[in-house]
Image (cartoon, rainbow, N blue to C red):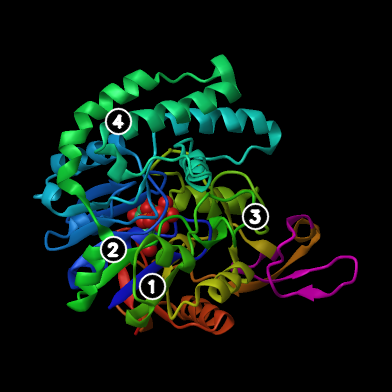
Amino acid sequence: MATIILGSQWGDEGKGKLTDILCPKAQICARAAGGHNAGHSIVANGVSYSFHLLPSGLVNPNCMNLIGSGVTFHVPSFFKELAELEEKGLTDVHNRILVSDRCQVNFDLHAAVDGLEEVELGSRKIGTTGRGIGPSYSTKAGRSGVRVHEIFNEEVFERKLRQLAAGYKKRFGDLLKYDVEEEIARFKEYRPKLAHYCTDAVQYLKKAQDRDYKILIEGANALMLDIDYGTYPYVTSSNTGLGGIFTGLAINPRKLDKIIGVVKAYTTRVGEGIFKTEDLGEDGTQLQAIGREWGVSTGRKRRCGWLDLVVVKYSTNVNHYTVLNLTKLDVLDTFKTIKARILSNSVAVAYKDPQTGEEVDYFPADLDYLASLEVVYKEFEGWQKPTTAAKSFYDLPKQARAYVEFIEEFVGVPIGWIGTGPAREDMILKG
Ligand code: GTP
């Protein structure tokens, strides 16, 4: 059976921690899409681990880990991350990770192009992580990319990579700072080392599912960054929602256990693009400071604001969550900056068309129209007590319980877990 963990907002919801908690029950932990732009952080046994490309199941010594076919695979990051995890004391990591031989290779060329494309866009830049994810998916869709299995055919590999580099050179000329021959030389070193990790992931997952292995699938990024359903064009270049799980991993849809939507108790986003509940005032600054809202991968500060439940509902309509994990409830504990001068936390429950006065209760595709709408907030009394020590739902202050219950009811999906701090132990099982 497979359990899928997906980000319901713009990422950084805290998917890593839930993955870590559920991992001991799983035989395999897999990634389906994205690349080394993701940024899970896990605090386990007092040690903090950062994951970008690798599945966070590596923290669990009994879990096998798989990088699925939909992932764009950056070889230097793969080895670097494995080495870092080893340094932090994780054992046997090299024998607990497999890479699908159908993955696209993300070259340093793609990162160079990423930067140049952002410069080209000027004020309309996407705000990418600069890791070459977009260009790598572009070359995949343009059928000029290189797949992992091709690394092992030196002649094909070198021809395709030279061709790819020549194509970009034509477009960017001397602006492109990339030496294809140096990259080819680096791959001569990677090639013999990589063979150990590569596998036919379709075969691997077929056998695993036939044996009824428990598979935990760790979504990267989040639904609002999905290339089809997110705030296009301010999105990443893969399907980060439910669809991407099936294209990135050969999962049998009849063997699904849970689809878990991870919802941060407020909203954050990195990069450019629409964010209706963004708070550029004191509230946003406080959320950023208390929630430590800056990126694991990039160090970039995240934009912050109140929870947008229209977004979470939209995300649910696309991803069909069966249960939610509400995270970072504790960040709202001491909230002092208050709307309407009462102790409150707010959530967006609808948008309002200022022209017609009508409420818009869905997330529209047309972002210009969305930008013209006002946000309708509901305010909640703040609890102003620490929630981190709470061991059960009923240990939470009654105002916090009301907040949680409102979200459940509004979205129409039960909340199974509530995060009350960064550590593994700070998670209430609501049941
Ligand atoms: P992406 O894959 O990049 O979207 O990130 P993610 O969803 O995996 O987020 P990540 O697991 O990196 O979590 C972001 C940060 O939130 C990390 O520093 C976590 O330790 C922290 N975190 C997770 N849950 C909680 C929580 O309930 N409370 C607090 N205070 N911090 C939390």
Between discs 2 and 3, the one toward the N terminus:
2
The image position of residue 367, as x and y in percent, is 73, 56
Tag 4 residue: 155
Query: What's the distance in space between the residues labelled 1 and 2, CA to CA?
Result: 34 Å
Seen from this angle, which residue lies furthest right?
Answer: 355
Tag 3 residue: 275
The image position of residue 419, as x and y in percent, is 37, 67
Mark 3 neighbour density, 10 Å: few (under 14) some (14–19) many (20 or more)? some
Magenta-colored span: 340-368
Mark 1 and 2 residues: CB-CB less than 8 Å, in contact?
no
Seen from this angle, which residue lies furthest front?
Answer: 155
Tag 1 residue: 418
Single out the mark in the foreground, 4 or 3. 4
Question: Label 2 amino acid?
Answer: Val
Ligand 1 sits in quadrant: bottom left
In-image side of 400 versus 86 (left or right): right
Assess whether residue 364 is covered by the magenta stretch. yes
Q: Is residue 309 at all visible to an observer of this figure?
A: yes
Tell me the element at label 3: loop
Seen from this angle, which residue lies furthest top?
Answer: 174
Question: Label 3 amino acid?
Answer: Phe
Query: What's the distance in space between the residues labelled 2 and 4, CA to CA?
Result: 26 Å
Residue 202: assigned label: 2
Mark 4 neighbour density, 10 Å: few (under 14) some (14–19) many (20 or more)? few
